[in-house]
Image (cartoon, rainbow, N blue to C red):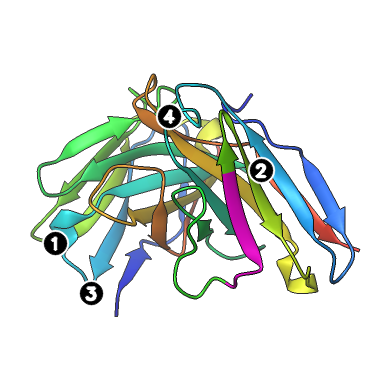
C-alpha cells in the first residue's frame, strides 16, 4: 500500500531537541519530493520545506530556515523533521506529504496522518 | 500574513455553487500552477486540484479550478454538507524558492 506513516505524538520542554519521522512505503522513495507542513492550533497550513531523497536537495521556507532541519534516509525510506532548540511556538500538528511527481511544485497528493508536537515548560 | 490571499470564509446552501478566490503575485500564481487542498476536521489535507485545473483520480467533477494572471479560483458545484472544510490554495514562489499557502477559507454549508 502506498502510504506515509508518521511517528507518534511528542511532549517536550522549550530548548529541547526533537526528531519526528515519516516512513514511506509502496512507491520508489527516491523519486518523489517529501515535504512538511505545520498547523498551529486554530491557524492555517504553513509550508515548511521539502527534500528530494534521491540527492538530498532541500528547500526551506524562509520562515523556517535555520530553525528546523529536513533530512531523509534512503535505507530506511524515512524523512525527518528535526529541531535542536524547541520553542513554545513550535506546538502544532505536523504533516508530511509526498509530491505528485518528481517535478518540484506545490502539488502533494499523499499525506501522513500527522504528528502532534507540544512544547511546554 | 500569507503570501497568497484568500477570503477567510465562504458559505452556501446544499446544491448551490460557490467559488473561493486566491490572489497572488507574478512570482507565484503569475508564473506557476496553482494547487488546491481540502482540509476536513481531524483528517490530513487532501489534494483537490493540481496544475490549476486538474483533478486527481477520485476527486468528483463538482470541484474545478481556474487561473488567470495572478489570481485563481476554486469552484464547488452541487454543494453538499460533506464539503464543509477549510480550503487552501498553494503555489510555488520563484522568489522564495519555496511553496506558499493561502491563509485558508472556511466553507460553511448552511
**Label 2: how many Cα within 10 Å (few below 14, some 14–19, many 20+):** many
Which of the chains bears the disc numbered 2?
B
Look at mark 3 in the image and give the residue it sits on: A26
Q: Name the secondary structure under disc 4.
A: loop
Question: Does the stretch in magenta take in A45?
Answer: no
**Label 4: how many Cα within 10 Å (few below 14, some 14–19, many 20+):** some
Which of the chains bears the disc numbered 1?
A
Q: Are circles 1 and 4 on residues that touch, CB within 8 Å?
A: no
Which of the chains bears the disc numbered 4?
B
Q: Is residue A24 above or below residue A43?
A: below
Q: Which is more toward the observer, A13 or A29?
A: A29
> Mark 2 vs mark 3: same chain?
no
Left or right of A110, for residue A93: right
Disc number for residue A76: 1
N-term-proximal mark, 4 vs 2: 4
Q: Nearer the viewer, mark 1 or mark 4?
A: 4
Disc number for residue B31: 4
- Magenta part of the protein: which range? B60-66
N-term-proximal mark, 3 vs 1: 3
Q: Quadrant of the C terminus of chain A?
A: top right
Q: Toward which corner of the image does residue A50 lie, by quadrant?
A: top left
Task: Farthest residue to the front: give it.
Answer: B68
Look at mark 2 in the image and give the residue it sits on: B104
- Which percent across, then down, holds residue B81? 80, 72
Q: Name the secondary structure under disc 1.
A: loop
- Which percent across, then down, holds residue B6? 69, 36
Q: Nearer the viewer, mark 2 or mark 1?
A: 2
Amino acid at each position: 500500500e502506498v502510504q506515509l506513516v508518521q511517528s507518534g505524538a511528542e511532549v517536550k520542554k522549550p530548548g529541547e531537541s526533537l526528531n519526528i519521522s515519516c516512513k514511506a512505503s509502496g512507491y520508489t522513495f527516491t523519486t518523489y519530493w517529501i515535504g512538511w507542513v505545520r498547523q498551529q492550533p486554530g491557524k492555517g497550513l504553513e509550508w515548511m520545506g521539502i527534500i528530494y531523497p534521491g540527492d538530498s536537495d532541500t528547500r526551506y521556507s524562509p520562515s523556517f530556515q535555520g530553525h528546523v532541519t529536513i533530512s531523509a534516509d534512503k535505507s530506511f525510506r524515512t524523512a525527518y523533521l528535526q529541531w535542536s532548540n524547541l520553542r513554545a511556538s513550535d506546538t502544532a500538528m505536523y504533516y508530511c506529504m509526498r509530491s505528485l511527481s518528481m517535478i518540484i511544485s506545490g502539488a502533494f497528493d499523499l499525506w501522513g496522518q500527522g504528528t502532534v508536537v507540544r512544547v511546554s515548560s | 500574513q500569507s503570501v497568497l490571499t484568500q477570503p477567510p470564509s465562504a458559505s452556501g446552501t446544499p446544491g448551490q455553487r460557490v467559488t473561493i478566490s486566491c490572489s497572488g503575485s507574478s512570482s507565484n500564481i503569475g508564473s506557476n500552477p496553482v494547487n488546491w487542498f481540502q482540509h476536513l476536521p481531524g483528517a490530513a489535507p487532501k489534494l483537490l486540484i493540481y496544475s490549476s485545473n486538474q483533478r486527481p483520480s477520485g476527486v468528483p467533477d463538482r470541484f474545478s479550478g481556474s487561473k488567470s494572471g495572478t489570481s485563481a479560483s476554486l469552484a464547488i458545484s452541487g454543494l453538499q454538507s460533506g464539503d464543509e472544510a477549510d480550503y487552501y490554495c498553494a503555489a510555488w514562489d520563484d522568489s522564495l524558492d519555496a511553496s506558499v499557502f493561502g491563509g485558508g477559507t472556511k466553507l460553511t454549508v448552511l
